[in-house]
Each structure stands twice: as structure tokens, then as C-alpha cells.
Image (cartoon, helix red, strand yellow):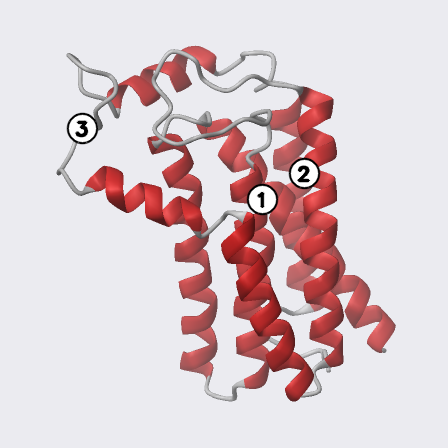
């Protein structure tokens, strides 16, 4: 069950929710209109070889690495992970977190799809896309899914272990994975950095809102 001394306190969840919404609102009225496009364009180009923009600057394994990392934020991997975690939560009779998981996964998918259609921002077209991507650009769906689902994964693990170090590790590892997935979308040229930050905000805000709702219902 969710309780006041769980890994994510209600007060901190409220702070996360408010901060994420504020940042997203700022980005939503600036980024799709091109307020940061010049800087974002320069940043994306800085990641590519000057003679051949289809090549990433850096070691030869970098492309393989980011292509595989980005898959962790795609629906096939997240579906498998979510089903596995749902099964574990059912075995542990963690019904509150099972509710949170299902609400986070389903709700984030719907919300992100609506926002993509609403803002209808096109993906960067001045660098070759190094992976297939077809939907709209703002916000990043991979980043939103990663923030929502992996944050929930980390909280689910942290909620059932007693050691503080293990709880911190679970949450820290979740944040690292979330960051890497978002960064991979920029390296692959399918998102502007502002798309990724907006996606993180959407996922974090929704996960925080669902957690707060579950905590209040649990009371």
C-alpha cells in the first residue's frame, strides 16, 4: 500500500507535479513556435560530422549504443516491462502500486498522443534521422513514456525494500535510464532538445498526479 513515508512523499510529489507543469507550459508557448530553433539547430549539428551529417561525432559504437538505448523507451520494451512488473505487484499484493502502474502507462500514452496532435510540431529535417520516426515531434513520446514508466518502476521497487541505500539506488538508476533515453532521441536527430524536456515534464507530471491520487484514495 502507499503510505506517507513511501519513497515519494506526497509533498515532494506535489512539487514535482507543479514544477513539471510550469516548465511544460513555458516550453509549450515557446518551443513549437521556434523560439529556440536556432540554438537547437546548432546543437543538433554539433553532434554530427561536419563532412557527413549522417555520421555522429564520437566513437564508432555511439550510434549502436543510442539506437539500443532508445528502444528502452519504445512501446514493445515498456509493454513487456510493465506486464512483468504488474505480475510482480500482483504476487506481492501491492494493489495500490498496480493501480498506479496501469494508470500511468495508459494515461501517459493517451495524453502524449493528444499533445502531439495539438502542437503538430514537425521533427528536425536538417539532419538525417538515424532511426525511423513518424509521429509529431512535441513532446517526445519516448521521453514522456520513460519518465512516467521508469519513475514508477523505481518507486515500486523503492516502496517494497527497507534499505535506504537500495531505495536511493532504484530511484537513481531510473533517473539515469530516463535521461539516456531522452538524450538518445536528440543524438538520433528525431527530436529537438525542447521536445525531450517537454516529454520528461509530461511523464513526470502525470506519474506524480497518479501517485497523489492513489495516496489520497488510500487514505
Tell me: residue 115, above or below residue 42. Answer: below
- Is residue 189 at all visible to an observer of this figure? yes
Which label sits on residue 144?
1
**Quadrant in the rendering for residue 31:** top right
Dot placed on the residue nearer the N-terminal end, 2 or 3? 3
Dot placed on the residue nearer the N-terminal end, 1 or 2? 2
Q: Find numbered disc 3 in the image and state the secondary structure of the residue it sits on.
A: loop
Q: Is residue 98 left or right of residue 191?
A: right
Which is nearer the eye, 1 or 190? 190
Q: Find numbered disc 2 in the image and state the secondary structure of the residue it sits on.
A: helix
Q: Mark 3 packing: few (<14 Cα in 10 Å), some, or many (20+)?
A: some
Q: Residue at x 66, y 28 (%)?
A: 116
**Quadrant in the rendering for residue 153:** bottom right
Q: Residue at x 64, y 61 (%)?
A: 12
The residue pinned by badge 2 equals: 112
Which label sits on residue 114?
none
The residue pinned by badge 3 equals: 57
The answer to whether mark 1 and mark 2 are in CB contact below 8 A is yes
Which is nearer the eye, 43 or 140? 140
The answer to whether mark 3 and mark 1 are in CB contact below 8 A is no
Tell me: residue 36, above or below residue 57. Answer: above
Q: Residue at x 67, y 37 (%)?
A: 22
Q: Mark 2 packing: few (<14 Cα in 10 Å), some, or many (20+)?
A: many
x, y (%) of residue 182?
Answer: 44, 41
Amino acid at each position: 500500500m502507499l503510505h506517507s513515508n513511501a519513497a515519494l512523499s506526497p509533498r515532494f510529489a506535489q512539487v514535482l507535479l507543479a514544477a513539471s507543469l510550469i516548465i511544460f507550459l513555458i516550453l509549450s508557448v515557446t518551443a513549437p513556435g521556434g523560439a529556440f530553433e536556432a540554438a537547437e539547430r546548432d546543437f543538433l549539428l554539433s553532434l554530427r560530422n561536419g563532412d557527413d551529417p549522417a555520421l555522429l561525432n564520437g566513437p564508432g559504437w555511439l550510434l549502436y549504443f543510442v539506437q539500443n538505448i532508445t528502444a528502452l523507451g519504445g512501446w514493445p520494451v515498456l509493454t513487456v516491462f510493465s506486464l512483468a512488473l504488474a505480475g510482480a505487484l500482483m504476487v506481492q499484493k501491492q494493489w495500490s502500486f498496480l493501480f498506479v502502474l496501469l494508470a500511468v502507462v495508459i494515461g501517459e500514452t493517451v495524453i502524449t498522443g493528444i499533445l502531439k496532435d495539438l502542437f503538430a510540431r514537425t521533427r528536425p529535417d536538417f539532419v538525417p534521422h538515424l532511426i525511423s520516426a513518424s509521429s509529431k515531434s512535441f513532446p517526445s513520446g519516448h521521453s514522456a513514456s520513460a519518465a512516467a514508466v521508469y519513475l514508477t518502476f523505481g518507486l515500486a521497487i523503492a516502496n517494497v525494500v527497507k534499505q535506504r541505500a537500495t531505495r536511493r539506488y532504484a530511484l537513481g538508476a531510473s533517473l539515469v535510464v530516463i535521461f539516456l533515453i531522452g538524450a538518445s532521441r536528440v543524438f538520433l536527430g528525431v527530436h529537438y532538445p525542447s521536445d525531450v524536456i517537454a516529454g520528461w515534464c509530461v511523464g513526470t507530471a502525470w506519474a506524480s498526479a497518479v501517485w497523489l491520487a492513489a495516496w489520497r484514495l488510500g487514505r
